[in-house]
Amino acid sequence: MHYSKFGFAATALLLSLQGSAQVPEDGLTSRELGISLESPISRVELLERGEAVYDYWCNTCHGPEMLKPGTAALAIKYRGELPATLTERTDMVPEFVELMVREGISMMPFFRPTEISNADLDAVTAYLTQNTGE
Amino acid sequence: MAIPPGVNEQDFRTALGEFESAVGSDWVFTEDEDTRLYRDAYSPVQNEPEEILVSAAVAPDNTEEVQQVVRTANRYRIPIYPISTGRNLGYGGSAPNLSGSVVLDLKRMNRVIEVDDKRHYAIVEPGVSYFDLYRYIQDRNLKVLIDCPDPGWGSVVGNALDHGVGYTWGAYRDHFISHCGMEVVLPDGELMRTGMGALPGADTWGEYRYGFGPHVDGLFSQGNFGVVTKMGFHLFPEPEAYLKGTVSVPARRDIIDLVAIVNQLEHAGLIGMPRYNTPLTAHFSEPEVAEILNQPFARSAQDLERWAQGNDMAYYRCELQFYGPGETVRANWNYAQRLLSDIPGAKFSLDHELQWPIAADEVEGLHKVALGIPNMEIFRLGTRPDAETLGWDGEMWFAPLIPKSGEAVLEAQEVFTEAFREMGMRSFTHPASTPATWMYRAFIFIMGFPVSRIDVEANQRQREAFTHLANLGAERGWGEYRTPPVFQDLIMGHYSFNDHALRRFSETLKDAVDPNGIISAGRGGIWPKHIREGRA
Ligand SMILES: Cc1cc2nc3c(=O)[nH]c(=O)nc-3n(C[C@H](O)[C@H](O)[C@H](O)COP(=O)(O)OP(=O)(O)OC[C@H]3O[C@@H](n4cnc5c(N)ncnc54)[C@H](O)[C@@H]3O)c2cc1C
């Protein structure tokens, strides 16, 4: 499953960061994701973490399927001028991602740091803006 | 910095320092950019003076930290408000009832303590979402279903504590009824366990709910007597098969026999959640039908029925869901058709048959929560281009309990539709409205009232309408089962038998258990003494 692939990557990341962290038996939970970044990590690790955060928190509404409410809403909003799936966008800037996560829009509520920590927000922002300008 | 009401700044600063020692400074939030994340995202009073804002938030990681925070709050009389995942959208979000409270955000406490798929229960912490619990079960290939509400991001604990509901079988979908034992931090910081958890060494926490003596668990649901830190839940053993069939009936008053027969099936344990609906709403925007609905109620009901029959359409449908062995679900579906054939013109369709384990592609387009699979698809409510909800920024749920009878449905259709007409508002109900069936033993006649992020006047109008309908319903004995904080005093006021004996009893308990009135002041319409007296 897509999920556990990154569960593994993030587990490795978590171990490297915290040393004594418990190894989750499988899958990621918000518990593993909710750690705060204590030491600098590489860009690759940042993007991996961003993807894991995205899969856990964003994908349930913004995944590629039209049944996903965020994707359905953006399809109506952009009428094909921009992709409805966030991971296909090439125009997003960090401020925009941060605003959406911490402010929400329309029916999408904001997310708190106990859910998406500031470090996780940085990671998911990096992940979602990696193709910006391409 | 905002200061909680009735607290002096010095004490508040000291308390914040103690909160930081308890949970770490990363997990005490006092900056505006953080505290505003504890507003109700769907507040019907947003940007108005009544909007509830919080002074701070504290996020403990474990029960001992909760105890320390509660002790500090009690010492300095700081109002605190526990939330689990704080996604109570439509019923208050993450916001307290009392502005200036400190939110106790339990999202970080997200351990699944135990899932037993031989004895069929789970014990979880408040931060565990339905998604988390589902994943835990899937990852371990455990043979149990969870009963989830439509949005999967909520808390198994938080949802149950607000009497939340789901979609599968009988009592499992009443999440508070399906709970079994809890651990609670009391207002003085003491730790208590209920049910079998109270017996040291017992291994039956998740199995037998009462233990011995008074069953006090109910005080912690829609109440304000403590902070729940763990809860057990009975789980539905994974069945072998699922079958969904639909019965359609042609006449408006057929709802009477339809409900009676479906009740018989459900209360005898032959079906899971039945779901009533009408195919007619899809035609409401057609000019002919719109005109029919524009008339006074009795007339529009008559003409709508005639229109449906003239177009060979059913008036109501009911989806019946069967869970069990393959042979049994088919036999029960046959039996249901035999009973329901007594309704003249009843028609039947077999919609789906599935076997566990269910593959992901088999459930596309199905109502996944009926199969125990959490998801977020309900939020498409607000995204369909044709939907009336397009442009809404949220909703507040008006959710009155009515009897589980067709007669009550007919009456509610009329009472509410006429009320909207009198208010000069577009009606959320009509002569074919059907009840929601989350409660095992009563109907909910639910409606979502739109909430805007910017249009204060629109929100005011919706609140007035909500209040009017709530009062109107209460005159007929229909009470809300749950409601956003701005309406909780109103609704508790409706439950007024013998000069509000119920509320007075809760207040007596509140004063005894929480003399400083620190926990969730106002929740469920129960206020601590000093605030009650300040108002009288
Ligand atoms: C589109 C939509 C669909 C919805 N569908 C459903 C549905 O199908 N079924 C349903 O039930 N609801 C539904 N809701 C309402 C709501 O979103 C869910 O019930 C949600 O699960 C509640 O939020 P939560 O689980 O995060 O609980 P929380 O917000 O964490 O808790 C709810 C309340 O319980 C109390 N509480 C929470 N934790 C504790 C604790 N540990 N100790 C003491 N008190 C506590 C607090 O007063 C808190 O405000 C829906 C809402 C929307 C907008």
Image: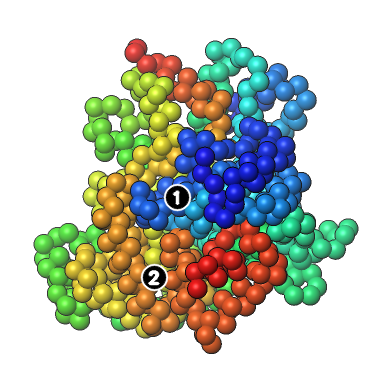
Residue B374, placed above or below residue B426: above
In the structure shown, which secondary structural element does the residue marked by tag 2 occupy? loop
Q: CA distance from mark 2 to mark 1?
A: 24 Å
At x 33%, y 60%, the residue is B449
User: Residue B126 location, x and y as percent?
Assistant: 64, 50
Which chain is indicated by disc 1?
A: B
User: Can residue B322 be seen?
Assistant: no
Find residue B254 and report its image quarter: bottom left
**Residue kind at label 2, given as amino acid type:** Phe
- Rendered view: B211 above or below B385: below
Q: Of B301 and A42, which appears nearest the observer?
A: A42
Q: Which mark is residue B445?
A: 2
Q: Position of residue B243 (x, y in %)?
A: 49, 60
The crowding category of the residue bearing disc 1, from other C-alpha atoms within 10 Å (few below 14, some 14 to 19, many at least 20), is many
State yes or no: Cβ of the residue under disc 1 lies below 8 Å from any atom of ligand 1.
no
Q: Earlier in the sequence, mark 2 or mark 1?
A: 1
Image-based side of B364 in relation to B312, left or right: right
Label 2 and label 1 in one chain: yes
Q: Amino acid at mark 1?
A: Asp
The residue drawn where x is 36% and y is 39% is A105
Q: Nearer the viewer, residue B39 or B121?
A: B39
The spot of residue A41 in percent (x, y) is: 61, 14
- Residue B296: tell me if it is visible: yes
Where residue B506 sits: x, y (%)? Answer: 62, 73
Q: Nearer the viewer, mark 2 or mark 1?
A: 1
Instruction: Say which chain tag 2 marks.
Output: B
Q: Please rate how many residues cluster around mark 2, counting C-alpha atoms within 10 Å: few if below 14, some from 14 to 19, many from 20.
A: many
Q: Which residue is mark 1?
A: B40
